[in-house]
Image: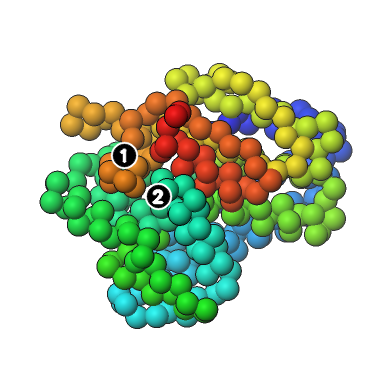
Amino acid sequence: MTLALLLTAALASADETRARYLMGTTCTITASHDQSIERAFSEIDRIERRISSWKPESELSRVNRAPVGEPQAVSPELSELLRETVRWHRETGGAFNPLLGPLVHAWRVREEGAIPIPEALVELRKRIAIENLVLGDSTLSRMGEAQIEEGGFGKGYAIDRAVDVARAAGAKRVVIDFGGQIGAYGIERGFEVGIAHPESRERAALMLRIRDGSISTSSGSERRFRIGGRELSHIIDPRTGEPLPPSGSATVIHPSALVADILSTALYVLGPR
Ligand code: AMP
Ligand code: MG
């Protein structure tokens, strides 16, 4: 999470800012052209309806419910997005894993936290093996009760698409603040982003400037819980199957918001070294 208070500061005074609740958080869009803001919101809404695991009727939820081993027809969009996440799974040595659904649910990292029994953990770790996602040309099969979890990459993808749509609609400048991840386009003097201090989130640990591209920060302090005498975060190390303790944060600047989102999560898992 970054600080949103500077959102309008670097933009021209004629630019308009609007906020909407999407993908479980507030999305704020500032652009030089108000029609493009509405188009960008519609695009995020469309993506949410396709890839949100919180929406039972989304394409992703349908795939997550499909019978194991039976190929399901999938849209080129979802298929391509998942292919990209599998590629980053490999590039990060497994630190990023798009199949973490079963572990996210078992540890209840989206809620108040829970500790799965050790026997369950062994089974859960088998379910997140990347081989359990079989992508065909226009089909997807899930093996071994795999469950796709979009929490580590969905907002990044949505930012990329929303910036593209806003530009296509005529915006010359765009800034999207989506739950703290920033996407920017055409901000000549650079858009200033405050990176929240991991120990006291209301103050900025550093300031960064971005003209075109995205800044994503993953931090264990963003959502933490104490359970069984352990302090844990919402970020899980796929190699151990356990949530990591809140410690520091990882920030990635990248032309692609999807890549920044994925890599900030992966680098938090990999740690400072
Ligand atoms: P972020 O805030 O972008 O770092 O994403 C954290 C969210 O991604 C969590 O709330 C989980 O839904 C999911 N997640 C947690 N750990 C991982 C991981 N190692 N790889 C992929 N997604 C993860
Ligand atoms: Mg992420």
Q: Position of residue 216 (x, y in %)?
A: 58, 38
Q: Dividing the picture into quarters, in which one does residue 5 lie?
A: top right
Across and down, in percent, residue 66 comes to 35, 75
Residue type for callout 2: Gly
Whole-angstrom CA distance, mark 1 to mark 2, is 15 Å
User: In front of the other: label 1 or label 2?
Assistant: 2
Q: Is residue 131 left or right of residue 125?
A: right
- Near-viewer residue (190 or 166): 190
Q: Are marks 1 and 2 in contact (CB under 8 Å)?
A: no
Q: Residue at x 65, y 49 (%)?
A: 256
Which part of the image, by quadrant, shows the C terminus? top left
Q: Give the residue at x 31% y 46%.
A: 239
In the displayed structure, 106 sits above or below 60; it is above
Q: Earlier in the sequence, mark 1 or mark 2?
A: 2
* Residue, disc 2: 94
- Determine which residue is flagged by label 1: 243
Q: Amino acid at mark 1?
A: Pro
Q: Under tag 1, what secondary structure?
A: strand
